[in-house]
Amino acid sequence: MTTAVSFSQVSRHYGAVKAVDRVDLDVREGEFFAMLGPSGSGKTTSLRLIAGFEQPTAGHIEIFGETAEGVPPYRRNVNTVFQDYALFPHLNVVDNVAYGLMVRGVAKAERRRAAEEVLAMVKLPGYGDRRPGQLSGGQRQRVALARALVNRPKVLLLDEPLGALDLKLREQMQEELKALQRQLGITFVFVTHDQGEALSMADRVAVFSEGRITQVGTPQEIYQRPASRFVADFVGSSNVLPPDFVQRYCGQRGWGSLRPESIRIQADASGDGVPARVLSKSYLGAATRVVLDADGLRINAILPAGARLPDDGEAVVLTFNRETLHVMGGEG
Amino acid sequence: MSANPAILPRRGGVAGALSDAFWRHPGLLLFLMLTPPVLWLGIIYLGSLFALLAQSFFSIDEFSGLVQYEFTLKTYGELLRAQNLDVIVRTVVMAAIVTLAAAAVAFPIAYFAARYAKGKWKAFFYLAVMLPLWSSYLVKVYAWKLILAKEGILNWLLAKLHLTWLLEAWLSLPIVGGNSLSFSYTGTFLVFLYVWLPFMILPLQAALERVPGNLVEASSDLGAAPATTFRHVIFPLALPGLVAGSIFTFSLTLGDYIIPQIVGTSRLFIGQAVYAHQGTAGNIPLAAAFTVVPIVVMGFYLWGAKRLGAFDAM
């Protein structure tokens, strides 16, 4: 399998700030790769290193086997969908989409045809003569996507492209993006701080923290077997359990991660399990989150709709399957 | 009666009542704020301008030298005489060249200030651009006369650089040349350029500042080399600023009568012609007709700029 993008020991420092610090990364050809992390974790800087807007202060970057350091963005066959779209306000939709082709000297009729074709692909047929200012956020998003895709890039970079959309539109775009990626077979590198988005769309996810990658894996691996307390907490807000607790209930020693939905609550306070007291509940629609206190340790549990809800202050017992408690290696 | 009512009582007597009234009728506040300046502009400024323009449709009695208050186009006929047409062409060409040169000089300065200058450098930029505007216009023009004079610093510098021959060659050219720089169109041009340059830099810088940096990145990302990005993204988006700046430099040059009087040849510019006709010659109708010229030229200029799409990005 070909490697689309490869980082070896790549750093991007701004003075004392280590935006990206000794990162190793391999993005495979044709995969949907997500870079997930909180703001300031280095995921966007990594994306900009691939696009060429930033140059690494150390390390080596390859794009399809070719050295990328020192190559300006306009010589990289890589296109970006910007976070705030960055559409040209003085050009109409067709000219925006056809910009990359115009720059390459494609004839006017040909580039108009290609632009219309891609606009139809992103479900905006007939919008060509409008200005970006006349479009809604979701439509601008599609134009930005079309403008990048029309160039048939080797890698498509997406910088939090769904961040500004409302929930419903975002879910719809997630599906469409995924479908588009499968249909075109282009490598997508997607930056997001939304773990749900990363898990639902990506083939593989890299979790960034403080300029470094803490874990790379499939969504299942990341979710079920987080490599560190940070990953466990950031992806799906797991219950991070201290070594003493894990040893008491599981036998092994080490930091543990227990997903809120793996926890069952039993009203019989004398039964086997972890004794706890209910602090509060919040209704989530499809489920209810219960916050509990287990001898000073705060634990979140998610109960599906229909389950019996304990009262606030009630003494309960928590149970879970051993396999669902994931013990993390090292200090976590 | 609660200590913390849901609706607070009105405060501050009359001022409070006024505040409430203005809040309920925003149009009233707008009306009160705009009336004085509109009256000022409408009556004092536009009124006197129209009074002046009306003069251009009167004529002067050649024997008595008195103005005849009858509608006639005779004055405009006079304006088209070779010697007057000459003044108009000279002024318009000078204004156009000054504008082009100002745009060329201002663009890199404004671009640097808008895209790269931060903090202290930005303050330094504003200071450097504005500083010449703080001193008297006359002082600046006389300073330039000294700089450009035969015994001036520029000649001295060129002599030190062994470039006197270059200056001599330039001054021996027709039209742009002359006895010395301070008695040539080249000198007039340089002073115009210097004096009006801030009026080009500031609007251009403001326009360039509003071009989002990510558009430049997007263009580069889509395969455009820097020159292509400049041509297709930066320039079109900065055009309104360029047009605003050129309106200043162009119209200020069209109307000025002091610079060509102090630095340059004895041939007249429109401003000088207006000054001469309304003053010593006492030919107010012709002076008024001359003042119509810059207004008409600017009208065509703006119309042309609009046709070219200069305001599309606004």
Image (cartoon, coloured by chain):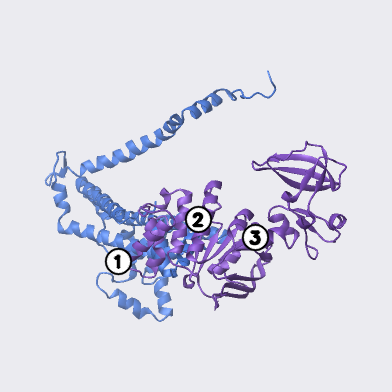
Chain colours: A purple, B blue
Q: Quadrant of the N terminus of chain A?
A: bottom right
Position in image of residue B43 (x %, y %) = 32, 36
Position in image of residue B164 (x %, y %) = 37, 79
Query: Judging from the image, what secondary structure is the residue with disc 2 in?
Result: helix
Query: Judging from the image, what secondary structure is the residue with disc 1 in?
Result: helix
Q: Of the residues shown, which amino acid type is indicated by label 2? A: Glu
Q: Label 3: how many residues lie within 10 Å, few (<14), some (14-19) or many (20+)?
A: many
Task: Please tell me in which quadrant of the rendered image residue B7 appears.
Answer: top right
Taking the spot 37% from the left edge, 69% from the top edge, the residue there is B149
Residue B170 located left or right of residue B63: right
Mark closer to the chain start, 2 or 3: 2
Total labels drawn: 3
According to the image, label 1 marks what residue? B185
Position in image of residue A267 (x %, y %) = 81, 40
Image height of B220 relative to A140, above or below: below
Position in image of residue A69 (x %, y %) = 56, 75
According to the image, label 2 marks what residue? A176
Q: Which mark is residue A219?
A: 3
